Amino acid sequence: MLGIVLALAVVQLPAQTPAAPFAAETFDPIVLGGIHRGAYPGAVLLVGRRDTVLYAKGYGHFTWSARSPLDRPDSTIFDLASLSKPIATTTALMLLVDRGRVQLDAPVATYLPDFHAPGTGTITLRMLLTHTSGLRADLPTAQLRSLRTRADLLRAVYAESPRLPPESRVVYSDLNAVLLGEIVARRSGEPLDRFVAREVFQPLAMRDARYRPPSGERPRIAPTGIWHGHPVAGDVNDPTAAKLGGVSGNAGVFATGWDLARFAQFLLRGGTLADGTRLVKEETIRLFTTRSPQADVGPDHRALGWQAVPTDETISSAGSLFGPRSFGHTGWTGTSLWIDPDRDLFVILLTNRAFAPRSRRSFSVLKQVRGLVADAAARANDLARPH
């Protein structure tokens, strides 16, 4: 009976928020409802502003067993999946733009001469960031399996031609991000993971954020798969990133909820660290996080490396109340971050939906939970800060 009540709570969120808006009563029915509907065994939720975290709580366990570890915002490490794209790859490109190392409207071949298949000559970095390059979503599964090494995969990506005319449509593509990751490596002069660790994660005090977490951290990592009956944690749950050795522009970052809270606050502060030191120019932050007119060629709106609103989802992961300048991203494993700069508000929901979901429509349930959490946070914010 409890499961039924909680499940209903997910789809019947009360219109009124409690007297203490950023409280368990606001968010528990939504996040616990996703667990009881079988979408994910555990989650962490953080809501905050540029200078504070207003709410942080863990829900459920690493697995469906009550004997498995509890999820905690400060210590549970999640495979961020495609949330790696904006957190690591896009932020690295912001730094390189600031330093004059890359130009957004330069052809990709300027930095990756091997990317010269027919039709690629007009594809720019901006098109990769807005997913308007015309490249397909990914390499086919059979082709991926046939590729033995990182070099094999990169050669296959460099040989790709656009399937649609560039800038004619938004097609979300891991190939775009793979190319961007390689551009970061070429222009920084070191591997993507090393550059991001030194230039992004360390300055922002994202202490647990990294590619390829060491084996000693695995007891803290929420599993995303099962192998021979045992949970698998710490190996990137993405075939393209795995083939690239766990370091790719499209996926591979592992982090805690608190790591992402520090990152979201950095963006809301306009590119400065907590002590006021500037890491990225404010105008660069604004450029990358503003909805791009070049990507207004379909229902899926994009900023540079970020998703913008409105999204093309039937049930938006940003909810229905986040403002028109909001931006965010999601990850296949069950992760998401949305930021409303006009409200000075961020919402982080990290789950391990990819681990043995008990719902046949786990992703649909998770989308609903994401949207309801975002709406609840927006209502709570507006109640705490009336217009």
Image (cartoon, helix red, strand yellow):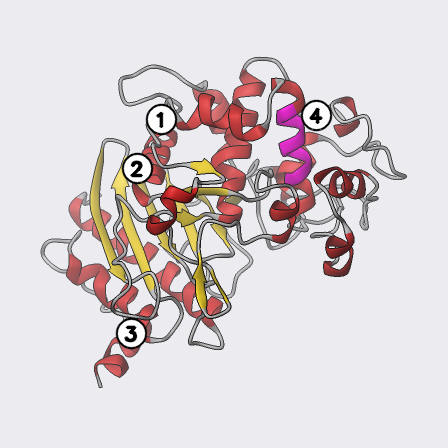
Which residue sits at x=42%, y=58%?
223
Taking the magenta stretch, the answer to whether it contains residue 85 is no
The mark lying in front, picked from 1 and 2, is: 1
Residue on which the image places disc 2 = 344
Give the x, y percent position of residue 306.
52, 41
Asked if residue 329 lies left or right of residue 156, the reply is left
Q: What residue span does the magenta drawing correspond to? A: 177-185
- Between disc 4 and disc 1, whose residue precedes? 4
For mark 1, give the secondary structure.
Answer: loop
Give me the C-alpha separation between circle 4 and circle 2. Answer: 30 Å
Report the front residue among 230 and 256. 230
Residue on which the image places disc 3 = 12
The mark lying in front, picked from 4 and 1, is: 1
Residue on which the image places disc 1 = 204
Quadrant (top left/top right/bottom left/bottom right) for the C terminus: top left
- Between disc 4 and disc 2, whose residue precedes? 4
- Between disc 1 and disc 2, whose residue precedes? 1
- Between disc 3 and disc 1, whose residue precedes? 3
- Examine the image and state in which quarter residue 181 appears: top right
Residue on which the image places disc 4 = 105
Q: Identity of the amino acid at label 1? A: Leu
Give me the C-alpha separation between circle 3 and circle 1. Answer: 38 Å
Q: Is residue 3 above or below residue 19?
A: below
Q: What crowding class fits label 3: few (fewer than 14 Cα within 10 Å), some (14-19), or many (20 or more)?
A: few
- Between disc 3 and disc 2, whose residue precedes? 3
User: Do the residues under discs 3 and 1 have CB atoms within 8 angstroms?
Assistant: no
